[in-house]
Amino acid sequence: QTVVTQEPSLSVSPGGTVTLTCGLSSDSVSKINYPTWYQQTPGQAPRTLIYNTDSRSSGVPDRFSGSILGNKGALTITGAQADDEADYYCLLFFSTGPYWVFGGGTKLTVL
Amino acid sequence: EVQLVESGGGLVQPGGSLRLSCEGSGFTFGRYWMSWVRLLPGRGLEWMTNITPDGSEKFYVESVKGRFTTSRDNAGNRLYLQMNSLRAEDTAIYYCARYLVSQVYFDLWGRGSLVTVSS
């Protein structure tokens, strides 16, 4: 069973920088997994922030950026704002199947 | 307006069945892969199933194989999820989503439909 790992919770100060990561329990994340990042607030549908590792979705502020850091996918928020407080999910693609797996999500607190 | 709207959720007893529907509008529904994703309470998002534009290929997560079936009616711009043998752990908000196969992500989501499995 493929397990995608994320930090359960993180906090950041307003104006600060935070990096969320997306890993695999028994492998490295790379561009062939097409890491995607979603933001979700209570009662709302997920919103796409980053797709294909580092492509920003339309309308997403440039303080959100995606990358591969070491053996993990990463979402960096630079200059965090209060309304960035949300749950963040990464999604990975696996061509052997194919199948798609979400990480468990990171609850980001801005305080 | 480009949108997806789910319907059909509700309360069902363990072992029961339910069919969810998702209507797409504002885009050429029959040209896209479509998907179902659910938000499990306390556990996050789970991809469940994808279906190709013509409905000839379907892919499922292991936890729903043999119990859930996805289908589509392109003439009516609708996606369906037939859920059988429901369990308490299937309680979730169910989203339909449009999948962009060229860019490998779900780009358009519905607002979701709540399914509660309880006696």
Image (cartoon, coloured by chain):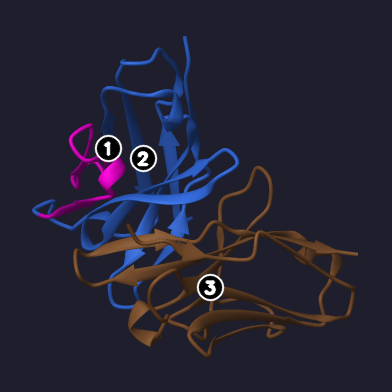
Chain colours: A brown, B blue
B79 to the left or right of A65: left
Task: Please identify, in this view, whether the residue under mark 3 or under mark 1 is nearer the observer.
Answer: 3
Query: Whole-Å distance between the Cαs marked 3 and 1?
Result: 31 Å
Residue B27 at x, y = what percent? Answer: 35, 59
Point out the stretch of residues depicted in magenta: B57-80
Considering only order in the chain, which callout, 2 or 1, is on the residue closer to the N terminus? Answer: 2
Magenta-colored stretch includes residue B49: no
User: Label 1 is found on which chain of the structure?
Assistant: B
Q: Residue at x 39, y 72 (%)?
A: A26
Can you tell which mark lies on residue B22? 2
User: Between marks 2 and 3, how big is the CA–CA gap?
Assistant: 30 Å
Which residue is painted at 36% across and 42% down in the image?
Answer: B23
Q: Is residue B112 left or right of residue A101?
A: right
Query: Could you tell me which secondary element the residue under label 2 belongs to?
Result: strand
Same chain under badges 1 and 2? The reply is yes
The answer to which of A75 and B93 lies nearer the viewer is A75
Checking the image for residue A22, the label placed there is 3
Q: Residue at x 42, y 61 (%)?
A: A3
Mark 2 vs mark 3, foreground winner is 3
Mark linked to residue B80: 1
